[in-house]
């Protein structure tokens, strides 16, 4: 008998069609991955560029708040040039996609100086470029093809895009409508626990802030070089005041400075710490974490007219450094202790230029006012918008020595 066998049909893989499909899928996947990598790379470059622009804008704005504002005959152009150069130098210390950031510091370049103006009609604040009393710096940092320095991308063969553009525009401003200071978390206010006698009501004493500094009757023997960071012997156009602690076996009337109890109970270790590092939030706990003083809102502190050996050592290490301190209008004996009660009415900024023996156990500090821009300053937000200088301010809070430094855009 003839037998037949049936065999099931077998399917054969169609390798010629499947392999190209997989290849296409891989190419698409790789292209998508390349786009993601390049996008992340550009995002990282954008963040780095923004950080560089912020640093440059803050440096430029800080340079606008220079000691030249206290010199009657200073050339305003020097301050503008210093601001542009500071922005360029700081930008160059930052890297974007592995290369240092470059900004054009020319007058028509990437650093614009001017003022913030409140448009009453539109209720908007806008930047107005001006060389007259500038208080705002606008820095534009670019890594673009138009400036011949774009950010190189990784996978150009798949995407066909070899470069990417990133641009960052940042605005920083100084403002002297100061009502107080407050430390940030983990930081301190760069201040001294010191108060200087504002003025003598009898007008007999001449060693007061009013006479020596504001009336410009103080000597001009020392100067400070901000580039070298050094004090030199020679006039620099800013008057000085000699601050004296209480001599041995004399009463406090011979001194014109006081060491204040700002949360330290005048313990030597804590006072020395404040001389070195400033006021912490803990030091200001009894004041609500901040220091606000004005003629209409004075603060009274226990005070001593004496400087200890530890105080003097700390001051020796602060030569040339700007620091905030207070002015006192009155110092009365404390009936319950040997201390004084000092009524403090203003915040100012000083730079200690020299420390020396004053005789009979006293100590003398030669100090001059300085202009100090700090992010710890508090602005008076209740007054009309203002970013001008003290000379043209419409508010009593304009401080010629202390400025708030902040990013405003």
Image (cartoon, helix red, strand yellow):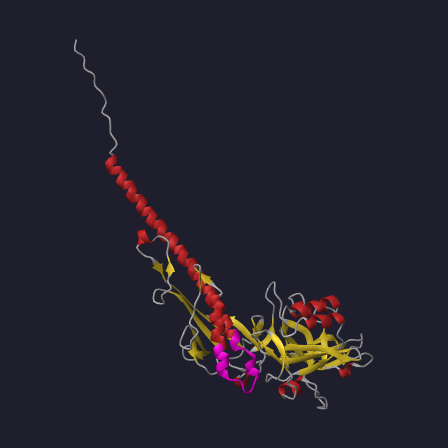
User: Whole-percent x and y of residue 227?
Assistant: 56, 74
User: Whole-percent x and y of residue 336?
Assistant: 80, 74
- Let me know if residue 299 appears in the view: no
Q: Name the residue nearer the viewer: 279 or 157.
A: 157
Q: Name the residue nearer the viewer: 376 or 215.
A: 215
Question: How many numbered discs, if any?
Answer: 0
Which residue is at a point 26% across and 37% down the rendered structure image? 18
Q: Is residue 189 above or below residue 14?
A: below
Majority SS type along the magenta span: helix
Which residue is at a point 49% across and 75% down the rendered structure image? 83
User: Whole-percent x and y of residue 304?
Assistant: 75, 75
The answer to whether 200 appears left or right of 337 in the picture is left
The answer to whether 195 appears left or right of 37 in the picture is right
- Is 23 one of the magenta-colored residues? no
Q: Is residue 276 above or below residue 386?
A: above
Quadrant assignment for the N terminus = top left
Q: Quadrant of residue 140?
A: bottom left
Residue that extends furthest to the left in the rendered view of this protein: 2
Query: Which residues, given as a range, are shown in magenta?
Result: 62-81
- Let me know if residue 177 appears in the view: yes
The answer to whether 375 appears left or right of 52 in the picture is right
Residue that extends furthest to the top in the rendered view of this protein: 1
- Is 74 one of the magenta-colored residues? yes
Q: Name the residue nearer the viewer: 88 or 13.
A: 88
Which residue is at a point 44% across and 71% down the rendered structure image? 139
Residue that extends furthest to the right in the rendered view of this protein: 249
Q: Name the residue nearer the viewer: 253 or 144.
A: 144
User: Whole-percent x and y of residue 195?
Assistant: 69, 78
Q: Quadrant of residue 201?
A: bottom right
């Amino acid at each position: 008998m003839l037998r037949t066998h049936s065999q099931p049909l077998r399917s054969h893989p169609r390798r010629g069609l499947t392999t190209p499909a997989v290849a296409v899928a891989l190419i698409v996947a790789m292209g998508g991955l390349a786009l993601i990598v390049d996008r992340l790379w550009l995002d990282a470059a954008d963040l780095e560029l923004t950080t560089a622009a912020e640093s440059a804008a803050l440096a430029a704005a800080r340079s606008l708040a220079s000691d030249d504002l206290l010199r009657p005959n200073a050339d305003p152009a020097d301050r503008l040039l210093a601001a542009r150069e500071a922005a360029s130098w700081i930008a160059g210390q930052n890297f974007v996609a592995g290369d240092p950031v470059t900004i054009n510091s020319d007058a028509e370049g990437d650093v614009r100086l001017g003022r913030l103006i409140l448009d009453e009609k539109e209720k908007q604040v806008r930047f107005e470029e001006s060389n007259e009393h500038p208080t705002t710096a606008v820095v534009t940092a670019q890594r673009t093809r138009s400036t011949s320095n774009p950010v190189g991308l990784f996978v150009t063969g798949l995407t066909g895009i070899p470069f990417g553009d990133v641009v960052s525009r940042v605005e920083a401003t100084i403002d002297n409508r100061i009502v107080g200071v407050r430390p940030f978390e983990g930081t301190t206010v760069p201040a001294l626990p010191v108060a200087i006698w504002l003025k003598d009501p009898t007008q007999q004493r001449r060693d007061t802030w009013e006479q020596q500094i504001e009336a410009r009757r103080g000597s001009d023997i020392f100067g400070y070089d901000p580039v070298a960071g050094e004090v030199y012997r020679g006039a620099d156009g800013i008057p000085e005041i000699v601050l004296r602690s209480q001599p041995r076996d004399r009463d406090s009337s011979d001194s014109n400075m006081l060491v204040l109890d700002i949360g330290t109970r005048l313990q030597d270790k804590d006072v020395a710490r404040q001389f070195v590092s400033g006021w912490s939030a803990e030091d200001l706990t009894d004041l609500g974490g901040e220091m606000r003083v004005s003629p209409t809102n004075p603060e009274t502190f226990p005070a001593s007219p004496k400087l200890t050996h530890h105080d003097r050592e700390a001051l020796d290490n602060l030569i040339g450094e700007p620091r905030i301190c207070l002015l006192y209008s009155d110092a009365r004996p404390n009936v319950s202790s040997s201390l004084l009660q000092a009524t403090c009415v203003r915040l100012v900024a000083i730079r200690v230029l020299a420390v020396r023996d004053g005789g009979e156990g006293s100590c003398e500090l030669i100090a001059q006012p300085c202009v100090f821009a700090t992010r710890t300053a508090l602005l008076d937000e209740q007054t009309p918008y203002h970013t001008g200088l003290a000379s043209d301010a419409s508010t009593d809070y304009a401080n010629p020595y202390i400025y708030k430094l902040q990013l405003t855009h």
